[in-house]
Amino acid sequence: MAKVLVIGSGGREHAIVRSLTDDADVDHVYVAPGNGGTGAMENVTNLPLKDSTDLVAFADREEIGLTVIGPEQPLVEGLADLFHQHELRVFGFKKSAAQLEGSKSFAKDFMKKYAIPTAQFEVFTSFRKGFAYLQAQFNENPHNKFFIKADELCAGKGVISASTLEEGRLALKALLLDKCCGTGGKVVIEEALPGQEASLFALTDGSTVVTLPPAQDHKRALDNDEGLNTGGMGAYAPAKIVGGKVYERIEQEIILPTLMGMEEERISDCGILFFGLMIDPKGKPYVLEYNVRFGDPEAQAVLTLLKSDLYPLLNACATKTLEGSVAKWHKGAAVTVVMAVSGYPTEYNYQGEEIMGISKAEALDDIVLDHAGTEHHDGKFFTKGGRVLGVTARGTDVAAARKQAYKAVSKIKFDGMHYRKDIAAKALE
Ligand code: AMP
Ligand code: GLY
């Protein structure tokens, strides 16, 4: 029986913890720092640790069998490297491979080098040269649309779309001159691709992969994909857009060349590859971005479909023994609705409000709740953050799961509550 340490505090980490606590080989899960939901679980302990040295010391002292690093920031900063240096078993890419998420220009150059389909792009360090490029592009075709991306991690705020030269100028100014994301040294300008997005996760030990059912996220804050871009307001899996033929193309044209490229660059590693995909109207898949962790809230939906134990899969990645592993999945679909505070993602009002109805929602069939911004004290839950809860239902199909998820959502109330009413609606069209 193993003790597992999970690093992170979001809904994604709650879903990972929830999955691990069901596993036969796991006797206790520690979460650093965790959230109100993980803190209230049996056989789970929240740890108020954030500092990497403390985390390593804890894992060493407590003989943790496996540490799972949830979010991108510690991966990009090299937390997995530190665990390796101390000969502690860890699931998550080292700094060298985490650059696939940590630097947009690194990822785009990598894709270009290994002929992995992605949008046309240019990299700029100078506002003047970036602006001249956009000017030439818009002169050639005024209907062009571009995405201007900060090179560095920026908590989802580093990607700005531009349908006019003026929007492009403002984006370049924000990222390169006002340095609103990190050091602001570099941007990628890329053409907009048409199509539907999907998120595909692949567990890897560096040479083998096990892919998870594809998911679709809902990034905008409001119904009908309006409002600001958020971390994700809901998700469902499996995503219909990734049918058999499209999946085969993703495997051949994206997953295998990515693994080969990583090997060639000597950055093959154990962890998760998250392919942020655009599937064009002809069914051709493109990579919009690589991430090196589970998506949030996609993980909540996808892990709810996992029938096999999660621990053996993650452990097989960490011990480079993934070959031959098979993940079994529940039939049907899972739908996750995120309940946030109104104003998210820019304003975080309504903190400390009591959340009512959690146990009523959890009492419904096929429902699980993953907490994100919650606090637990005196036997009650309170809001603390932008995204508060993820409500996930599993059902025989998307329609059934969706109906049950919204039934559970209707039991929950807190002041300032906001959620989208159209999660997975497109999948039913
Ligand atoms: P990224 O972080 O690079 O995935 O970009 C964030 C979001 O911006 C994506 O999920 C898409 O919705 C959108 N996006 C980024 N790049 C493109 C592109 N080349 N074409 C269309 N949409 C894009
Ligand atoms: N839901 C998208 C992400 O986790 O990046």
Image: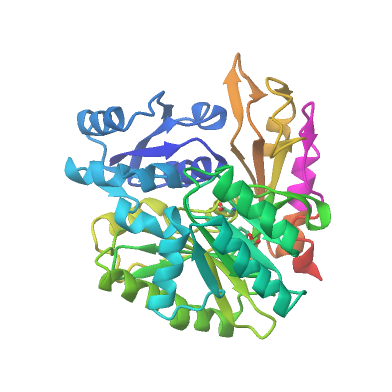
The residue at the far top in this view is: 378
The magenta-colored residue range is 403-421
The answer to whether residue 38 is left or right of residue 77 is right
Q: Is residue 240 visible?
A: no
Q: Is residue 200 visible?
A: yes
Task: Please name the residue shown 68% across and 56% down the image.
Answer: 169
The answer to whether residue 337 is left or right of residue 273 is right
Q: Nearer the viewer, residue 137 or 279?
A: 137
- Using the image, determine if residue 328 lies above or below residue 61: below
The answer to whether residue 76 is left or right of residue 140 is left
Task: Please name the residue shown 24% across and 41% down the image.
Answer: 82
> Residue 369 at what x, y percent from top left?
62, 40
> Residue 135 at what x, y percent from top left?
67, 69
Q: Nearer the viewer, residue 120 or 382?
A: 120
Q: Which quadrant of the view contains residue 416?
A: top right
Q: Nearer the viewer, residue 192 or 87?
A: 192
Task: Please name the residue shown 71% across and 32% down the image.
Answer: 347
Q: Is residue 121 magenta?
A: no
Q: Is residue 413 magenta?
A: yes
Number of callouts in the render? 0
Image quadrant in which the C terminus is located: bottom right
Task: Please name the residue shown 74% across and 30% down the image.
Answer: 357
